[in-house]
Image (spheres, rainbow, N blue to C red):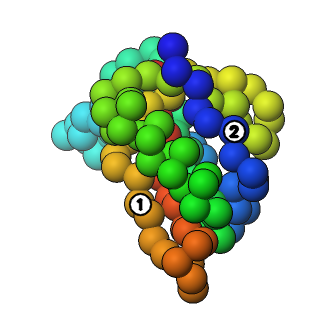
Amino acid sequence: MAVFPTLSVNPSVEPWEEGAAFDPTIRSQQEGGYVLTRARVTRIPSKWEIGYYALPSSDKNSIRTFEMDCKVGSDIFTWTNPTDNITYDVRFLNPVSYKMHETAFLWDVEFTLEQV
């Protein structure tokens, strides 16, 4: 299994967001105004929205190559969460976003990972 590349900078705190990948709740409205609920599944995967800002071109190219090797969200890879140092099996939820950061040599890179 592939491993997310090691980069020269840490992800930014500002766009960092983590939580459940989806809401597994099934709700059923009853005639008396009650709502019955139950879980659709027993396991709720996590998701992380991650951003790297002012990333050097070499790191941006590492992520781009890795994304293409994974065929965007097709392949599973291991990623270590920098906030808790736990390794997760994840995939890209959608294509990685690459935006130039004030100069042609620095990049803002954002992506969402989904636990599998």
Q: Give the amino acid type for the residue marked by disc 2 in the picture.
A: Thr
Q: How crowded is mark 1: few (under 14 residues within 10 Å), some or many (20 or more)?
A: few
Q: Which of 109 and 25 is in front in this view?
A: 109
Residue 54 image offset from top left, x and y in percent = 65, 70
Q: Which mark is residue 6?
A: 2
Residue at image location 57% in from the left, 82% down from the top: 103
Q: Is residue 106 above or below residue 36?
A: below
Q: Is residue 73 above or below residue 50?
A: above
Residue at image location 44% in from the left, 22% down from the top: 76
**Dot 2: what SS?**
loop
Residue farthest bottom in this picture? 102
Q: Residue 97 carries which label?
A: 1
* Left or right for 24, reference 5: left
Whether residue 88 is visible to the viewer of this picture, yes or no, is yes
Residue at image location 59% in from the left, 33% down from the top: 4
Q: Give the amino acid type for the residue marked by disc 1 in the picture.
A: Ser
Q: Residues under labels 1 and 2: Cα distance? A: 18 Å
Residue farthest right in this picture? 84
Q: In this view, does 107 lie above or below 37?
A: below
Whether residue 15 is visible to the viewer of this picture, yes or no, is no
Which of discs 1 and 2 lies nearer the camera? The answer is 2
**Dot 1: what SS?**
strand
Residue 75 image offset from top left, x and y in percent = 37, 24
Residue 43 image offset from top left, x and y in percent = 48, 18
